[in-house]
Amino acid sequence: MNKKIKIIAVSLLGVLLVMQFIRPDKNESGYESVAHFESETKPSDQIKAILKNNCYDCHSNQTIYPWYAEVAPVSYWLSHHIDEGKEHFNVSDWEKYEIKKKDHKLEELIEEVEEAEMPLDSYTWIHGNLSQEEQKLLITWVKNLRVKYASEK
């Protein structure tokens, strides 16, 4: 039994070592990927800071990676979270969305923030959470955007 445990432990160590050399693709297109979104939605500097600090890492084509993102299997876990976040809402694809889809994405954003579903707990452990004031500012800004898009339908 002891020999089996050693074989399993060495095998796992070998897999982890190999994983360090096989990296997931990074999400680093630069902040110009959010230029259209910001140009169209015109966030204030305060809202831009909220978006950059709490949203863009997972919901744009630009992620600022912490040091531990270089260590597998954490790198794979983060990559999965980013891919999933971008699948649901990607501000870098904003110009591709039709008005109806933009409005729906904004509606979802309000729901996720109001229900404290976003940002994810796993993100807030390291980066901190939105303050109540930041939540109010963000939600008010998004509600005003929805009014704008509703008039364009």
Image (cartoon, rainbow, N blue to C red):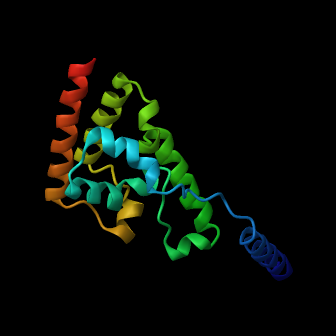
Quarter-wise, where is residue 45 in the image?
bottom left
Q: Quadrant of residue 21?
A: bottom right
Q: Nearer the viewer, residue 132 or 27?
A: 27
97 left or right of 142 in image? right
Percent across and percent down for residue 135 are: 19, 52
Quadrant in which the N terminus appears: bottom right
From what the image shows, is residue 144 above or below residue 130? Answer: above
Q: Residue at x 40, y 62 (%)?
A: 123
Is 45 or 52 nearer to us in this picture? 45
Expressed as whole percent of the image width and height from the top left, the position of residue 70 reads: 60, 72
Q: Position of residue 107 (x, y in %)?
A: 28, 33
Q: How many marks?
A: 0
Quadrant assignment for the C terminus: top left
Vertical side of 146 occupied by 79: above or below: below
Image-quadrant location for residue 54: bottom left
Q: Name the foreground residue: 122 vs 96.
A: 96
Is 107 located above or below residue 64 in the figure? above
The residue lying at 44 percent from left, 56 percent from top is: 31
Residue 29 location, x and y as percent? 54, 54
Q: Is residue 8 above or below residue 93?
A: below
